[in-house]
Image: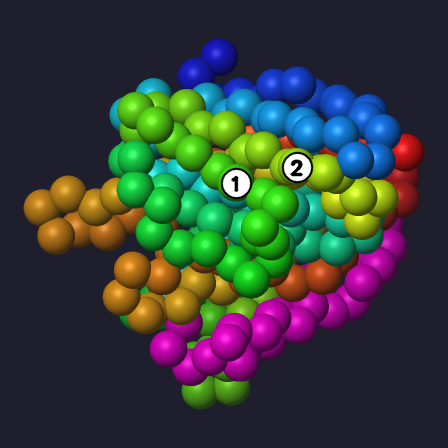
């Protein structure tokens, strides 16, 4: 399967613990995005990377959240001191930035990591 | 910032009939409008998209129309089948240099009745 993969698929943690999620984008996709989706809502943008550079961050990304993409391939999203309000589906997407002045916008999503904070 | 409104929140149609979902956006500079289908327990799947320089796009049973003047776009599914049952999301992307985020609507739960 050459789609976006995310691990783990489910995570249950106690309030106050730290959690880390991993995303592997589609091979050769140089843009990688993190979104959060709560029940009954559309995904909300958190942050995105082009290669290893983090270029845009949402105000939703509090100082307890940190995302990295050290080698421009996979990415990790860490949440420190989790709170019950962090319970959500965390989605990763990837896309291919334009080459030769041609932009591509299509974002392809992974299956998500469902976080439950008890 | 961009705001996307989606209607209806739920839609039930008979198998074989057509379904239409509508979205409005607030930022007239937005230039890309994708539609996603999300099944239970899965991530959103891109099913069709349209750019601001095109008024309509069709792919087999699904089509999207865009009215830039009114700032709204719609998803049309014809000859609906039970496997079309899912939650559908519209989204919009702004045109600010470097801005890549998608802003999503609230979703429409589509049920196809056999």
Q: Nearer the viewer, residue A59 or A81?
A: A81
Q: Nearer the viewer, residue B46 or A15?
A: A15
Residue at (66% x, 72% y) in the render: B5
Query: Do discs 2 and 1 share a chain?
Result: yes
Vertical comparison of B76 with B86: above or below: below
Compared across the picture, whether A55 is left or right of B2 comes to left
Cα separation between marks 2 and 1: 8 Å
- What is the chain letter for disc 1? A
Q: Nearer the viewer, residue B79 or A65?
A: A65
Q: Which residue is mark 1?
A: A66
Secondary structure of residue under mark 2: loop
In the image as oriented, which residue stretches furthest toward the top?
Answer: A1
Vertical comparison of A82 with B2: above or below: above
Pinpoint residue B74: horizontal percent, then vertical percent: 58, 66
**Residue A74 sits in quarter:** top left
What label does residue A80 carry, if any? Answer: 2
* Magenta part of the chain: B1-30
Pinpoint residue A20: horizontal percent, then vertical percent: 61, 26
Pinpoint residue A12: horizontal percent, then vertical percent: 82, 25
Q: Is residue A9 visible?
A: yes
Compared across the picture, whether B16 is left or right of B69 comes to right
């Amino acid at each position: 399967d050459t789609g976006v993969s995310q691990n783990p698929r489910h995570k249950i943690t106690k309030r106050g613990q730290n959690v880390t999620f991993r995303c592997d984008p589609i091979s050769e996709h140089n843009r990688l995005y993190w979104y959060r989706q709560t029940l009954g809502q559309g995904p909300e943008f958190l942050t995105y990377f082009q290669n290893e550079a983090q270029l845009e961050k949402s105000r939703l990304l509090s100082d307890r959240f940190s995302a990295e993409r050290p080698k421009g391939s996979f990415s990790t999203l860490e949440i420190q001191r989790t709170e019950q309000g962090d319970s959500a589906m965390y989605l990763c997407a990837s896309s291919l930035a334009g080459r030769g002045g041609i932009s591509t916008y299509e974002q392809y999503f992974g299956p998500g990591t469902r976080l439950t904070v008890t | 910032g961009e705001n996307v409104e989606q209607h209806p929140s739920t839609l039930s149609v008979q198998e074989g009939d057509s379904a239409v979902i509508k979205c409005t956006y607030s930022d007239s500079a937005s230039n890309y409008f994708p539609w996603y289908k999300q099944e239970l327990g899965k991530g959103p799947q891109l099913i069709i998209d349209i750019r601001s320089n095109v008024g309509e796009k069709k792919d087999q049973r699904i089509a999207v129309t865009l009215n830039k003047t009114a700032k709204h776009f719609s998803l049309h599914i014809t000859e609906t089948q039970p496997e079309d049952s899912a939650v559908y999301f519209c989204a919009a992307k702004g045109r600010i240099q470097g801005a890549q985020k998608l802003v999503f609507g609230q979703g429409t739960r589509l049920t196809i009745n056999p």
